Amino acid sequence: MSARSIALILLIALQYLSPAPAASDQASDERALREFYDLEEGKRLYGQYCGFCHGEGGKGKAYNLVSPPPPDLTAPAVQRKSDADLAKVIHEGEQGTAMGAWKWTLSEKEKQNVLLYLRQLAR
C-alpha cells in the first residue's frame, strides 16, 4: 500500500471518528445569528404584516374570520418548530390556510427579524 493510500484512509477514518458538533455549539451559532437580527424591526414588521390575523400577542386574533383559524404562535407546538420550518412558512405560506406567502414582500433579513420576534412572543 502506498503512503498516499494510507493517508487517504486515515483522512476518511478521522472524518467518521470526529465528534458531531455539540448542542451547545449549535445553540451558540443560533444565538449569534439572532444577535445579528433586529427584534424591534421584527416587532414592527409583525405589526404591519402579521398582527391582523395573529393578533398583537400572537394568540390568533382572526379565529372567527378565517378557517382554519391562525395558530397561536405562543403555543408549544409552534415554538417547538425549528427556525427553518417557521421561516419556510413565512416565506411560502401554508397551503390550505389563509396564511399567504411573504416571499415577494419581505426580504430574507426582514423574515428573520419577524422570526426573532415570534420567538419572543412565547416568553
Image: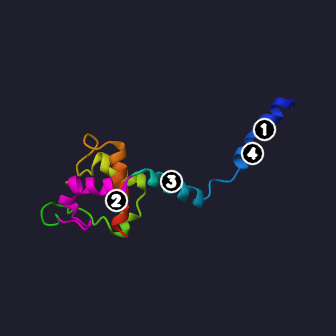
Mark closer to the chain start, 3 or 4: 4
Q: Residue at x 21, y 64 (%)?
A: 55
- Indicate which label's residue lies in the foreground, 2 or 4: 2
Q: Are marks 2 and 3 in contact (CB under 8 Å)?
A: no
Q: Residue at x 49, y 57 (%)?
A: 31
Q: CA distance from mark 2 to mark 3?
A: 15 Å
Label annotation for residue 32: 3
Q: Which residue is mark 4?
A: 14
Mark closer to the chain start, 3 or 1: 1
Is residue 50 a member of the stretch shown in magenta? yes
Q: Left or right: where does residue 122 sit relative to residue 57?
A: right
For the residue marked with disc 2, what is the amino acid? Answer: Tyr
Q: Is residue 60 above or below residue 8?
A: below
Q: CA distance from mark 3 to mark 4?
A: 29 Å
Range of residues picked out in magenta: 38-61
Q: Position of residue 113 (x, y in %)?
A: 35, 52
Q: Which residue is mark 2?
A: 117
Q: CA distance from mark 2 to mark 1?
A: 48 Å
Q: Could you tell me which secondary element the residue under label 1 belongs to?
A: helix
Q: CA distance from mark 2 to mark 4?
A: 41 Å
Q: Could you tell me which secondary element the residue under label 2 belongs to?
A: helix
